[in-house]
Image: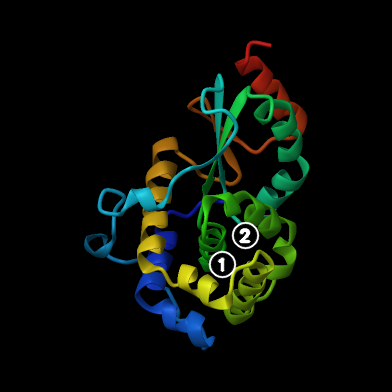
C-alpha cells in the first residue's frame, strides 16, 4: 500500500471543519476531493503535539528502539499485528531488549477515525483497542458506506465500555484530528516512510518483512 501525503491532511481538516455533524446524524458523508491550500493547513509546529503522544511498549531504556508506522485500514498491517508482532513482543519487548513505538498512518477517513477511537479515553485503553481494531478489520472496515463504518466503530467503542456519546465526542474532536495528522506528516516525512507497515529500527527505515527476517534484524542490532 503506497503512502499518500496530501490526501490525509485534507481529510483531517475536512473532518475538523465539517464532518462532526455527519457523525451525529449519519447523513451522507461530505466529499473531500481537493487538498487544502498550504496557508490553511495546520502544521505540526502549530498543532498541540502534546495531544498526540507516542504509544509505546517495553523498556524506554532498551538497547534497541523500533518505530512501527501502520494504518488501521491496511490489511498487511493487520496481518503483521496478528502473525508477527506477538512473537516479537514475547521475545524482544517483554524481555526488555526492545522498546516498541507505534505510530499511525492515515490513508483515509476510516483509518483516521479508528485511530481517534483507539486514542479515546485513558492511554491504557490504546493497545487493547488496537488489538480489537486489527482483529476485526474485515468486519468494521469492509463496508463502502461511511455511515456503516461509523456505527461499526461506535459498536467497538461500546464493547470497551465507552458510551456512544463518548465515542462521538472523540470522533468529532477537531483539534485532535488536526494534531494527529500534523504529527503523522511530520514523523513520516522525517523518516521517509512510503509504505505500510514500515519500521524504523534504531533510525534505519525497513519495509515489511516476515518473522524470521525481523528476528534476525533485531538480534543483529542487539549484537547477538
> What is the secondary structure assignment of the residue under circle 2?
loop
Report x, y in % for residue 136.
73, 62
Relative to residue 77, is residue 175 drawn left or right? left
Residue beneath the point at 44% across and 36% down: 191
Residue beneath the point at 63% across and 22% down: 97
Which residue does the numbered mark 1 point to in the structure image?
110
- Image quadrant in which you'd find residue 158: bottom right
Which residue does the numbered mark 2 point to in the structure image?
73
- Image quadrant in which you'd find residue 17: bottom left
Which mark sits nearer the N-terminus, 1 or 2?
2
Camera-side residue of 149 and 96: 96
Residue beneath the point at 73% across and 27% down: 91
Residue reaching furthest to the top: 223
Packing grade of label 2 (10 A; few <14, some 14-19, many >=20) is many
Please report contact status of discs 1 and 2: CB closer than 8 Å, yes or no.
yes
Q: Which mark is residue 203?
A: none
Q: Quadrant of the C terminus?
A: top right
Relative to residue 175, is residue 220 drawn left or right? right
Residue beneath the point at 70% across and 46% down: 81
From this viewpoint, is residue 141 visible? no
Relative to residue 15, is residue 156 drawn left or right? right
* Cα separation between marks 1 and 2: 7 Å
From this viewpoint, is residue 137 visible? yes
Camera-side residue of 156 and 121: 121
8 shown above or below 29: above
> What is the secondary structure assignment of the residue under circle 1?
helix
Packing grade of label 1 (10 A; few <14, some 14-19, many >=20) is some
68 shown above or below 119: above
Amino acid at each position: 500500500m503506497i503512502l499518500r501525503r496530501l490526501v490525509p491532511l485534507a481529510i483531517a481538516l475536512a473532518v475538523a471543519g465539517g464532518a462532526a455533524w455527519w457523525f451525529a446524524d449519519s447523513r451522507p458523508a461530505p466529499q473531500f476531493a481537493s487538498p487544502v491550500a498550504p496557508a490553511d493547513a495546520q502544521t505540526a509546529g502549530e498543532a498541540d503535539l502534546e495531544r498526540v503522544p507516542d504509544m509505546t511498549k517495553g523498556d524506554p531504556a532498551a538497547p534497541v528502539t523500533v518505530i512501527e508506522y501502520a494504518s488501521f485500514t491496511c490489511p498487511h498491517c493487520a496481518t503483521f499485528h496478528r502473525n508477527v508482532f506477538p512473537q516479537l513482543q514475547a521475545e524482544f519487548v517483554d524481555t526488555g531488549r526492545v522498546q516498541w513505538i507505534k505510530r499511525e498512518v492515515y490513508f483515509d477517513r476510516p483509518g483516521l477515525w479508528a485511530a481517534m477511537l483507539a486514542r479515546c479515553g485513558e492511554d491504557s485503553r490504546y493497545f487493547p483497542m488496537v488489538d480489537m481494531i486489527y482483529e476485526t478489520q474485515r468486519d468494521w472496515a469492509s463496508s463502502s458506506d461511511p455511515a456503516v463504518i461509523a456505527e461499526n466503530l461506535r459498536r467497538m467503542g461500546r464493547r470497551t465500555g465507552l458510551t456512544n456519546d463518548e465515542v462521538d465526542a472523540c470522533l468529532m474532536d477537531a483539534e485532535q484530528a488536526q494534531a494527529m495528522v500534523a504529527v503523522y506528516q511530520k514523523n513520516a516525512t522525517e523518516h521517509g516512510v512510503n509504505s505500510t507497515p514500515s519500521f524504523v529500527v534504531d533510525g534505519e527505515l525497513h519495509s515489511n518483512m516476515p518473522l524470521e527476517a525481523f528476528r534476525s534484524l533485531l538480534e543483529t542490532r542487539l549484537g547477538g
